Amino acid sequence: MQKNEYIERAKEFLSSSRIIKLCYLGAFTVLVTCIIASQNFFFQSIIENGISKRDIIAQKTLTVEDVKRTEQHKREVAQKVEPILVPAEDDFIKSNLETLQNSIIQIRKKNNTEKEKIEELNVLFDLSGNPKRAFILDFLLHVDDASLREAFDKASLSLVNILQKGITEKDYEKDNINTLIQDNLITNVSKRQIIVIPALLEQVIVPNLVVDEAATEIAKLNAQESVKPYKVTFQKGEKIVFEGEPVTRLKRDALREAGYNVYELNWQGILSIYILVLFLTIIYLAYLKFFEKDFLEPRYLALSSVMTILACSIAVLLPTGFSPYILPIPAIIIISAIFLNPRIAFLLSSLTLVILTVGMQYETQFLIVFTILAIIGMITISKIKYTRRFDLIKAGFHLGVAGVLTMMSLYFIDKCLIDVNNYLILKNCTFLFANSIISSIAALGLSPLLESTFHIITPYGLAELGDHNQPLLKRLQIEAPGTYHHSLMVSTLCEAAAEAIGANPILARVGAFYHDIGKLKRPLFFVENQSYFSIENPHNTLNPRLSKMVITAHPKDGVDLAKEYGLPSIINDFILQHHGEGIAKYFYNQAVQEEGAENVKEEQFRYTGPKPNRKETAILMLADAVESAVRAMKGATVDQIENIIDKIIVERLNDGQLADSPLTLKDLKVIASTFSRILRGMQHNRIKYQENIAEEFAKNKIEMPNKILDEDFEKKIKELEDKTKTDNTDNKKDV
């Protein structure tokens, strides 16, 4: 018993909607991953552990960049770039020379012994290793002030020359300071000064040229950019790799150029692709959940899945060397924009492009071009008129032109940096343009098939259903003409109101055409058809409860007819919801009069519903009631029409019939105003023609049928016209 209980719980768990949805999610992501990864099986059959299992021959001439040699050449060029030096502050060096001069003068003025003065000079000067040390010290201590000043002046002038030439760190490293000083001494220097001045300058000179690291790095990068890629060419018929040869990066690039997918098939690669597909699928579902809940239905998700799987399959089956711009991405954009909506179309195509770009190793340009195309398609498709099918072909043309312009701009940018084959530009642009046109034609042709397969109604399908030559509407015209006329009036109200509040006017109009088709089962039981067939109201002989059953059955009868004629499921909503759970008031009041209020309950005379759950069906409920009420009041005034509209809307609100609809109070106000405007136009009066004029015209026409060209007849006709104009003018004045 316990075991059976566990089994039942397991079955219940596995059959829950959440588990089923997870299974669908897993099946889709696994299938897409398998399709993308299937291309790797071919490469796996020729390469194993980085070693070629057979000879692979080039089927066409291939030119491939040897990335390794190119990078090595770039490094060599960068190493040869000399550091860029910039001058440092020179005033600091000059001030050091002045400080040295002042210090020597102070030492000379002191009353110290000569030995003490020499010790102080040794602190200022580092003359170790200088063979002329004694002479330099003697000169600095005993030469007269004028000679000392002259030596420092000439040292200062020489320092200017040295600083202008520049001193680097390398000059210190190579002990070139003394040579640099000697080469830049001024000309009129005595033999004694030639010995002393270099000693003075050596004490103050420091490098005044330092390396600019940023500028040097830029120079190295520029040098690397100037290096042309090292190219290797494989002629047609030449072996790319030999059997048993290690497949280097160059060989892999050549194989990729030859059309092989060089991703090795391993669990890491497959898992990476699966994670990407799963992550993008979750993004798509999350967007629908938070922003487009209506499109989370299985039929919409099935259509999205089929288009993604189809695109991936075509990409994998595309022969080697074919341009990826023949992939039916524009068709996905157009079809999803029509069957879903333009925003979802952009998201779906963008996510599909990411999967293809990563999985098929397409260039980034492929992703950029088609992403821009998706944005343009989203805008273009949202603006087309679905009553004109050629507008879809024009949208495909616009996509093609936009794609060509985008691609050419990208290629021209590439041409500034690298050499791009003009034939390649022309070929890809031609493919993309033709692809866009063919995709729009294919989308137009496939629409009926997709509508019937996925049970999704499109604006094109709605336009077809709105044709009055449809079999069901023709039956309504012949078998229930009063109902047909009523449906036409209601459709006019629904279309105008839907357009006014931003709902779908085409859907509202077509739904109104079919909302009463259930009356075809018993057309003579509905008052609008009885006068046409000149029969007595059969309800006069029926019990109110039986009459209620006949009347409230027409929504269910309508759904049965809709299924029989293959109408889309969305039309069923209009058929079932146009009365909601409202009361058949006439028969309810009749039952109260006959049976007494205590014996009759409102629930017994209500329609089975459901209540309207979308704007269009809620508008239909109001329009159906308003049109019937106004038609029943012949010659209603403007105030009466507005009162009827307000009364019906308030009744439906108080009865809770609009509780499930997304209509706001503002929407209801706009709907009431629109109904009033349309009904005033329907209730217009016409000028009554005088009977004697019509009789006189008929009389003359009958008496002289063979005198059309007779002048007397033409005069009489002229007199009749003048008389008619005069009488009409008088009538207008009376009015």
Image (cartoon, helix red, strand yellow):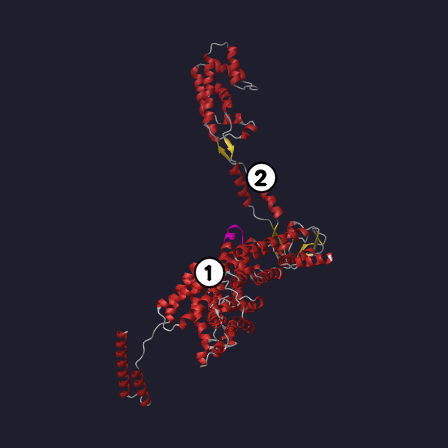
Residue 630 in the image, given as x and y percentages of width and height: 40, 70
Instruction: Mark yes or no: residue 389 visible.
Output: no
Viewer-side label of 1, 2: 1
Q: Residue at x 46, y 75 (%)?
A: 484
Q: Quadrant of residue 671?
A: bottom left
305 lies left or right of 91 = right
Q: Which residue is mark 1?
A: 663
Mark 1 to mark 2 CA distance (whole Å): 73 Å
Label 1 vs 2, first from the N-terminus: 2
Q: Which residue is mark 2?
A: 79
Q: Is residue 51 above or below residue 611?
A: above
Residue type indicated by callout 1: Leu
Q: Which one is nearer the viewer's eye here, 644 or 32?
A: 644
Q: Residue at x 66, y 59 (%)?
A: 12
Residue 255 in the image, given as x and y percentages of width and height: 64, 55
Q: Is residue 189 above or below residue 683?
A: above
Region in magenta: 412-422
- Mark 2, Cα crowd under 10 Å, few <14 / some 14-19 / many 20+, is few
